[in-house]
Image (spheres, grey):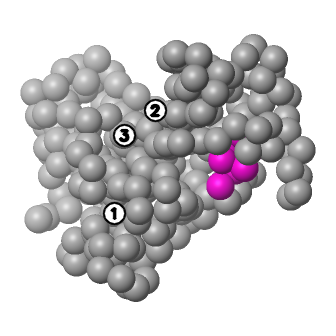
Amino acid sequence: MSNIMRLQKALSYAGVASRRAAEQMIDEGRIEVNGEVIVEQGKKVDIDSDTIKADDVKINFDRNKITLALNKPRGVESSMSVKIKNDSLSDLIDQKYKGVFPIGRLDKDTSGLILFTNDGELAYRLAHPKYTVEKIYIGLVDGEITKSILEKLRKGVELEDGLSRFDNVKIIGTNGEKTILEIAIHSGRNRIIRRTFDALGFEVKELSRVQFGPIKLGEMKLAKTRVLTNPEVSSLEKAVGL
């Protein structure tokens, strides 16, 4: 595909919107090219050299970079190395995406959203605690979680490797014997949620990550992958200052 194309086609190609919706965005003055707001239809752009923004979010047209989302099942290691069949992430990633690597980890017993990319700078920033990218989990915990326990989780629980503090935690269901919680945390330390509850005398029976920064798991089927859209990648880049 040529790198020179009409602006509305470029927006459609990047996954920002359909051509008709892209034309409407141009009419509304929501598109910039090299710092200039474009309001006329049909302007030609070079997707390899022009800086194009939609609603002030830079669009990445690098056709060599790719970012994927996977709904990881329980029992799969967060490793790309092949050990036992169906035991590592490499078994779940199509060979056509060779060269991508996981951003962070999910322990073997945790399911849910894990991202992959071949963009080293994006991966570094998403994984680094400096950029405080929030992750959201749904957990099933043995026992009744009281308001006082919630307060401890928000204030911080001392572990052997330092303080563990959840950004937010709320009860979304309970029957007195088990509690379902939504947990927001930016720390990427190993098994941090399970270890935090263990320190308070509770066992996490099930845990699933449902959101990583602005990217949500949604209705993705277990063990399936999808390529993130250009706007989704742009939202990740914006979250870490790229």
Q: Amino acid at mark 3?
A: Leu
| Residue 226, image x, y percentages | 25, 53
Q: Residue at x 60, y 33 (%)?
A: 142
Q: Amino acid at mark 1?
A: Ile
Is label 1 in contact with label 3 (beta carbons under 8 Å)?
no
Q: Position of residue 108 (x, y in %)?
A: 49, 62
Residue at the disc numbered 2: 56
Q: Which residues are magenta?
A: 191-197
How dense is the environment of label 1, judged by Cα within 10 Å: few (below 14), some, or many (20 and up)?
Answer: some
Q: Residue 83: image x %, image y %?
A: 40, 85
Q: Tell me if residue 33 can be seen.
A: no
User: Residue drawn 40% across and 65% down?
Assistant: 76
| Nearer to me, 223 or 95 | 223
- Residue at 35% over, 25% down: 30
Disc marking residue 66: 1
Q: Which of the two labelled residues, at mark 2 and mark 3, occupies the earlier sequence position?
A: 2
The first of marks 1 and 3 along the sequence is: 1
Magenta-span inclusion, residue 195: yes
What is the quadrant of residue 181 in the picture? top right
Mark 2 residue crowding within 10 angstroms, few (<14) / some (14–19) / many (20+): few
Q: CA distance from mark 1 to mark 2?
A: 22 Å
Is 223 within the magenta?
A: no
Residue identifier under label 3: 217
Disc 1 from disc 3: Cα separation: 18 Å
Please state if 168 lies on the left or on the right of 120 as rendered: right
Pointer 2 with pointer 3, Cβ within 8 A: no
Q: Name the residue rendered at 28%, 17% in the picture.
A: 28
Give the foreground label among 1 and 2: 1
Vertical placement of residue 159 versus 24, above or below: below
